[in-house]
Image (cartoon, grey):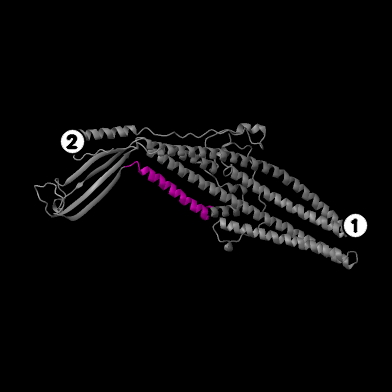
Amino acid sequence: MKLAMIRTSPISVRAAASMLILGLCSACSTVGPNYERPQLELPANWKALPAADESRWHIAAPADAAPRHDWWVVYGDPVLNDLMDRCVARNYSLQAALTRLDLAQAQIAIRGAAGTPQVQAGATAQRSRISADRPLANYAVPNQSTVQNDFKPSLSVSYEFDWLGRIRRDVEGARASAEQTQADIENLRLLLTAQLASSYFTLRQADQEQEVVQANLVLQRKVLDLQVKRHQLGSATQVDLEQQQALITSTQAQLDLLKAQRAQQENAIATLTGTPAAEFTLSASDRVTAVPALPAGLPSTLLERRPDVASAERAMAAANAQIGVNQAARYPNLMLAPNVGGFESNTLSHLISTPALIWSLGIGSSMTLFDGGRIDASVNQAKAAYAGTVASYRQTVLAAVEETQTALSNLQQMAQAVRDQDESVRHQDRAFQIGLLRYREGLDNTLQLAVSEQNLLTAQRSQTQLHGTQLQYSVTLIKALGGGWAGLHQP
C-alpha cells in the first residue's frame, strides 16, 4: 500500500510526522540472531609439552587484530630479511589481494549509504503541442490545439526507515566480510613469506651440501693421486684407479644435481620477490642458520593469531548477519518517498515565484503477502549457509591444532635426529682417517677405502639435509602458529 499527500492539510502532516517518529523510535530493534562465537573443545595440552605446562593452555577470544611481527627475524639472517621485505612490498599476488580489501571496504560504504537520505536534483524543460482532435473531456466544450512550455526544476529526498535493522544487519555482514578479507590477506602474506623462507633454506642447504661434496671431491682426488703413485710403484692395479675415478665422477654428478636444485629454488625466490627469474641472482653463502629456540611453553593464544582461523570466524559473523537481512523481507518497509519541492511554470520569467511553487510529502509502505515461500526459503538458505560456516570454522581450528601438534613433534624429534647424525659424522670421519692410514700402509685395499669415503660423504650430506629439514620444520611451526610466538603473552 502507498499513501501520498499533495498540499496536505495540517492534520495529515501531523499524521505523517507521527508515523515518522514511530519509525525512528522503532529503529532500535534489529531482526535476526545476534552473533556469538561457538565454543570449541580443545585439548588439555600439546603432546610435545611436559605435564607441567598444562596450565598454559586455555580457551581465549580471537586475537587476529593483535600486532604481528616480522617472524623471520628470529633467524638472524640479513639476506633473508631483505628478501622478505621485497616479497611483502613487491609480490603481485599480495598486491592483487589488497585490491580485494579495497573492494570489501567500498561495500561497507555502499551498504551503509542505504541508511542515509538520498537527495536528488533534477530539471526538465519542454515545449509541446496538444492535439485538437484528442478525445473530448466535455462534449459542450470543443478541444483546441495548444502549444505551451513547461519548465520544472525539482529537488527530491527519499529515506528508508531501518526500523527492523535490515540495513544495520547488511552493514554488519559487509563489515565482517571486509574483516574476513583482511584475514585472508594476512593468511596469504603468511603463506608467501613461509614459502619464501622454505625456498631460501632449501637453497642454503644446497649451498652447504655443495661445500661438503666439493670437500669430498678434493679428498677423493688426493686419494686418486696416491693411487696413481702406488700404481707406478706396482702396489695398485688399474682396477683400483678405475674404481676411484668412477667414485669421483659419481660425486661430480651429485654436485651437478645440487646446482640444478639450487637454481630451481633461486628462480622460485625471484618470483616470490616480484623479480624476473632471468634477472635474479643470489650469491652462495657458507653461513649456517641456527634453529630458533622454542619458548618454555606454547599457550593456546598462539592459535588465535592464525589468519585462516580468523577468516573462518569472520565468515560465520557475515553469514549470521545475512539471516537477519533475509528475515527482514517478511515485514513491511517504510519509505519517506517522495519528498519533492520545486517550481513549475510555462514561462521562465515566472518560474521562481510563489504561484509556481510545487511540493509533495508522502510515506510509502509495502509488504509481501504471498511469494510461494520464497522468503522462507531464503531464510532457510541463510541459516544453512551459517551452519556450514560453523562447521568450516570448527574444522579449521582442528586443522590448526593438528598442524601445530605435528610441527611441534617433528621439530623436537628432528632435534634428536640432528644430534645423532652429528655423532655419526664424527665416527665416519674417524673411520675414514683410520682407513686412509691403513691404505697408505698397505693394510687395506682400494675397495675398502672407497667404501669408507662414500660412507663419510653420505653421512655429511645427511647431516646437512637434517639441519635443513630442521629449519623447514621450524618454518612450518611458525606458520602453524599464525606467524611466530614473539611478543605474545605467556599465561
Residue 481, percent across and down?
59, 42
Q: Nearer the viewer, residue 239 or 76?
A: 239
Residues marked 2 and 1 touching at CB (< 8 Å): no
The amino acid on which the numbered mark 1 sits, given as a three-letter code, is: Leu
User: Is residue 152 depicted above or below 116 in this figure?
Assistant: below
Regarding mark 1 in the picture, which secondary structure is present there? loop
The residue identified by callout 1 is 443
Q: Is residue 294 left or right of residue 173?
A: right
Sequence-first tag of 2 and 1: 2
Q: Nearer the viewer, residue 394 or 432?
A: 394
Q: Is residue 325 visible?
A: no
Q: Nearer the viewer, residue 335 or 284?
A: 335
Residue 386, percent across and down?
48, 38
User: Is residue 481 depicted above or below 255 in this figure?
Assistant: above
Which residue is depicted at the point 48% across and 45% down? 182
Identify the mark at residue 137; answer none if there is no mark. Answer: none
Q: Residues within 10 Å of mark 2 (few under 14, many from 20)?
A: few
Determine which quarter of the picture holds residue 200. bottom right
Identify the mark at residue 9; answer none if there is no mark. Answer: 2
Nearest-to-viewer mark from 2 and 1:
2
Q: Which residues are magenta?
A: 88-116
Residue 360, percent across and down?
22, 42
Residue 188, percent across and down?
54, 49
Q: Is residue 218 left or right of residue 482?
A: right
Q: Is residue 268 visible?
A: yes
Q: Is residue 154 left or right of residue 439?
A: left
Regarding mark 2 in the picture, which secondary structure is present there? loop
